[in-house]
Image: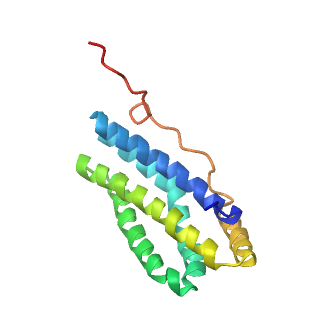
Amino acid sequence: MLRDNNLIPLSRQHQHALALCVRLDRAIRAGDVDLEAWQVEIQQQFESEIEVHFAVEEKLLFPAAAQFPDLQALIQELLTEHSVLRDYFARAAARELDLQRLAHFGQKLAEHIRKEERQLFEGMQKVMSSSELATLGEALNRALKDVSQTCALTSEATRLRPRTTNHS
């Protein structure tokens, strides 16, 4: 389903977070993980965008969706996931994530984002009227206006590297 324009600001932020997850997954698969550098980047991404993103979802998006009975259980799942993810972000800020937890974090964040995009956003687009979505979109734009709309710069240790092939 084509994304409603009123939800695109949140989808854009989802893309930034998914890019982090993809880079993290590739680094882990390549066996090239600087735990300190990744935790610094995760903390920075949380502080610059995700923290406000979660707050806006919880204050505006989730209550709007929870008005529809078909979406209420999903909203409860997403709120629980926010809590779990906040714990991972706090552990990254405290530099407490080992490789296994770092991998689990990336997996959980990617799954959460996909759930919001594929289930919540599509569900909202099916049950909400155009005017309800427009009102929500205006509120989202106001709430997100001061949040950075650019991807955070990666460090040398966390940037995506081209895949190399072994020529024997």
In which quadrant of the rendered view does residue 73 lie? bottom left
Q: Eyeballing the image, is 128 above or below 88? A: below
Q: Eyeballing the image, is 163 above or below 43? A: above
Would residue 78 be found to the left or right of residue 107 on screen? right
Q: Position of residue 102 (x, y in %)?
A: 30, 50
Please give the name of the residue rendered at 30% of the width and 54% of the height, measured from the top-left corner.
Answer: 104
Q: Position of residue 46 (x, y in %)?
A: 47, 55
In which quadrant of the rendered view does residue 22 lie? top left
- Looking at the image, the residue that sits furthest to the top is 168
Would residue 65 be found to the left or right of residue 163 on screen? right
Please give the name of the residue rendered at 51% of the width and 83% of the height, measured from the top-left corner.
Answer: 70
Give the camera-side residue of 89 and 115: 115
Which corner quadrant holds the N terminus?
bottom right
Give the camera-side residue of 158 and 70: 70
- Looking at the image, the residue that sits furthest to the front is 1
Residue 38 visible in the snapshot: yes
Would residue 123 be found to the left or right of residue 82 on screen? right
Q: Eyeballing the image, is 154 above or below 61? A: above
Please give the name of the residue rendered at 53% of the width and 49% of the height, measured from the top-left corner.
Answer: 16
Q: Eyeballing the image, is 165 above or below 158? A: above
Would residue 100 be found to the left or right of residue 18 on screen? left
Please give the name of the residue rendered at 35% of the width and 54% of the height, measured from the top-left corner.
Answer: 107
Q: Position of residue 101 (x, y in %)?
A: 27, 53
